[in-house]
Image (tube, grey):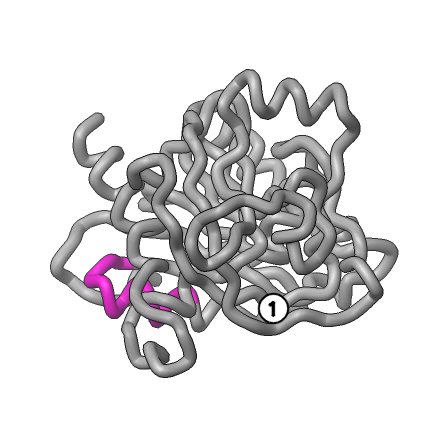
Amino acid sequence: MAVGGASSGFCFGIVVFPGSNCEQDVAGALAWLGYRYRYVWHQSGDLEGCDALILPGGFSYGDYLRAGAIARFSPVMEAVRTWVAAGGPVLGICNGFQILTEAGLLPGALRHNLNLKFLCRPVSLLVEKSVCQWLDLPVGTVLTLPINHFSGNYYCDDLMLGRLEAKGQVVLRYCQPDGSEARQASAPNGSVDGIAGITNERGNVFGLMPHPERGVEGITVGSGLGTDGRYFFSAIVKRMAGRA
């Protein structure tokens, strides 16, 4: 069932797994922005009416084995793979990012945070030059979004890191508030090369650990957060409208 604001005909499909707990945060952000949405249950392969898909944060299947390791086998993921192959846009936030890597839709892996500490705080993010379809901000833009994870330590080997750089797949890096890069030192979770978000070679699949849905309404400005999360949803709507 599609719900949310009626100012846009664009509809996001929010994929819900057992243990997801941020789907309503995403829905609230989309409704605030005036976009339609509908929930897609993990046992369903019905993506009818969806223009873009979002895999929200949470602890799918209790994060047993590894975060996202069981969710990759959910029936809905076959539909997601078909969707991706056809060029459909997919956004994975936090646990959604973990699921996308486990499913092989994004390279690399998410490991436990450095020092094995759960992290929940705002972070500064630097927009890199990339092929990502979900973001159209100028390179060098500094954003502020919250993180909320225990397994956000992105890892890939040196060969893969070189490929990500060469093909414009690094979308976001953790940085200092002034935008300066300390790479590894800027990553609170230990992510290799300070990576906070990546895309696939085609640019239609985007995974990030920070939560853009929690930086949309602007009601948390006093905490250091503003409305930077809006860009992550509006950009794909504009891009898909241009294609249409």
Magenta run includes residue 34: yes
Residue linked to disc 1:
148
At horizontal 77% and vertical 62% (from top left) the residue drawn is 63
Indicate whether 236 appears above or below 29: above
Q: Which residues are magenta?
A: 26-36
Measured as percent of width and height from the top left, residue 215 is found at 37, 67
Residue 39 visible in image: no
Q: Quadrant of the N terminus?
A: bottom left
* Residue 182 placement (x, y as % from top left): 60, 46
Residue 189 vertical placement versus 221 (above, below): above
Whether residue 156 is situated above or below residue 29 in the rendered picture: above
Q: Nearer the viewer, residue 7 or 136?
A: 136
Q: Quadrant of the C terminus?
A: top left
> Could you classify mark 1 by the number of other residues whose Cα lies within 10 Å: few (under 14), some (14-19), or many (20 or more)?
some
Furthest residue toward right: 65
Left/right placement of residue 198 relative to residue 139 reads: right
Q: Position of residue 51 (x, y in %)?
A: 32, 42
Residue at x-position 62% and y-position 61% = 17
> At 42% from the left edge and 61% from the top edge, which residue is drawn?
144
Magenta-drawn stretch contains 205: no
